[in-house]
Image: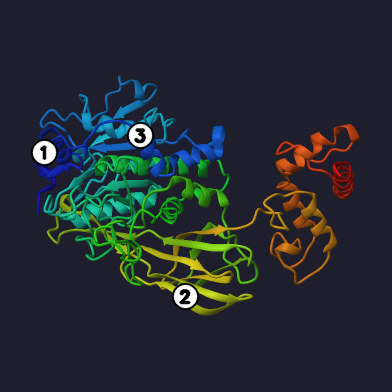
Amino acid sequence: MIARRTLLNTPDQMLVRTVGVAALLVAVCAGAQLGRAQAPTPGELDSIGWTQLMDRLGSTAPSGAGVDFSQIEVAFTNPSYAYAPDSTLGELTGKTFALKSGASGDSTHATNVARNAYGSKGIAPDVTQIDVYQSDSYIGAGMLRPLTLSLPAVETRDVENHSWVLLPGGVSYGPELLRRFDYMLDRDNVVSVVGVNNGSASAFPQGMANSYNSIAVGRTDGNSTQGPTTVDVAGRVKPDIVAGLDPLTGDGRNVSTATAWVSGAAALLVETANTSGNVNARQMETIKAALLAGATKDEFDLTGSTATTADDWSHTPTRPLDYRYGAGELNVDNSHRILSAGEFEASTTSDVASTGWDFDTIAAGGANWYFFEVIPEANFEQLSIIATWNRTFDVGIDDGGDGNPLNDIYTFEPRLANIDLRLYQAEDYTAGALLESSTSTIDNVEHLFAQNLPSGRYAINVTSDIATEFAIAWDAILDAPLPGDANLDGTVDGLDYLVWASNFGLGDVGFTQGDFNNDHVVDGLDYIIWSQNYSPSLAAASLSGASADAGTTFGQGAATAIPEPAGVALAVCGAGLLCGWLSRRRR
């Protein structure tokens, strides 16, 4: 065991390396693009759903505003310990850096991570407050303080980025380090994003990707460390998620950059949570669940149809994620949709939406049920469900048995719930046939993934052996009709109102009879859905212009004010009469 004096006073004796260093050296020698230092390209932003998020929300899209960041970097040149981003770079203008490990020169690696995570052209450009740690300082006296009678320091920042690895055998107290790390993340509610190593044949790093409560990141091109874990319970699934590929060029970025993209995406979700008014949205488990549930698998071979196995994505009931690609590739637009869909409590008497999440405490031996329905008019293309929870700890003191209190240290005895996740067909609020299960006994994540399911009722079931907090996120990808489009003509207009009105008050009816909220009765709640989505077609708008001389108007496009019910009926009737008049004039 390394003495505490050595640990705290000579951090250069710890074996650490930057995740991107090896790739950068290869780039210099062989002209490869793995280590290029630049902000994300348009193709790369498309690949992780960032462009789609910006297009969907426009000026209201999250940008990382109000989210604080910690960036942990290896000393790029020992012994000078240059670990800080170049604050004079134009893309980092307006950022405030707190150098937590002392004075530093500019690190090219740290600068590239900063540009990609929160630079002006990066994923979360409005992050402005950044603490920067040298990695040895962070795992030593600066934060984790292993092998001491001191708890880890309090992490006051929302998101951490660890684009570095601790190589196998780097320290003799690996489990102690990981337990303190997980303890701090759980205690301080920190979303910590950590990289695995570059190279598909590289050994799994000792830290920090072996941790439970962080989000471990690999590369979409597969050229990064594969699971399973090796320290503090071997055999667990990691990485959790991947990123870092430009689909337009086929170029893959190194793990350092991929990690920066995921931490930037986490910052966008944290901002969204902070402005939602729901404190449960900001729980680290919720953010992690939304990121993983929103990950895409279209990039990979799901059926074993290609000649190589290197692009295969697979999992089993006892292995929740893929050892190479985790839950799939980051898609921040999907994850934002999930988080924005809102929280739904477990219930055996009411449905949840087909996309959403929950943060809850489940009792020992308890079961949470989430029922939802897919209407016959919808094509149920894909379902992704993630449950995740933290490893927690009982903190004690080891006196070493020598009678000297100066040698006492804190101990961290882990407690990990065994949560299982299942999907059933359902009849009303009764579970039927089991469809999918995720039942790992050693991981703190469970994942269900299914494609091309039939319409109908479904039940998601969560069980646990001990009481624990957990988050669950789900996303049903549906090719569904527009809300309120009863006649399925692609437009929500007065004709759909007439369907609703003619069936008002009826029960045991469906979407095409005006039951837009699927509660099996046509009522005022369905009218609200129709009115909120009212948008006459361009054809109706053209009809309005053609009939101006006749004094009849019907529809002004998306900007049209929602008419009152009586007005809609009159407008539809008027439009019908006008069509007949125009038809007679054309004869």
Q: Nearer the viewer, residue 160 or 30?
A: 30
Q: Which residue is drawn at 42% across and 35% down?
A: 124
Q: In which quarter of the image is the C terminus?
A: top right
Task: Say whether marks 3 and 2 touch (CB < 8 Å).
Answer: no
Question: Which residue was labeled with disc 1?
Answer: 12
Q: Is residue 400 visible?
A: yes
Is 192 left, or right, of 384 in this rendering?
A: left
Secondary-structure class at tag 2: strand
Q: How far apart are marks 1 and 2 (CA)?
A: 53 Å
Question: Which quadrant would residue 501 be assigned to in this image?
Answer: bottom right
Q: Residue at x 21, y 26 (%)?
A: 104
Residue 341 placed where, x, y %?
57, 52
Q: In this view, does 246 lie above or below 220?
A: above
Residue 71 placed where, x, y %?
30, 37
Question: Which residue was labeled with disc 3?
Answer: 41
Q: How far apart are marks 1 and 3 (CA)?
A: 36 Å
Q: Which amino acid does label 2 sit on?
A: Leu
Q: Nearer the viewer, residue 562 or 145?
A: 562
Disc nearer the start of the sequence (3/2): 3
Q: Which amino acid does label 3 sit on?
A: Thr
Q: In which quarter of the image is the N terminus?
A: bottom left
Question: Which dot marks residue 556?
Answer: none
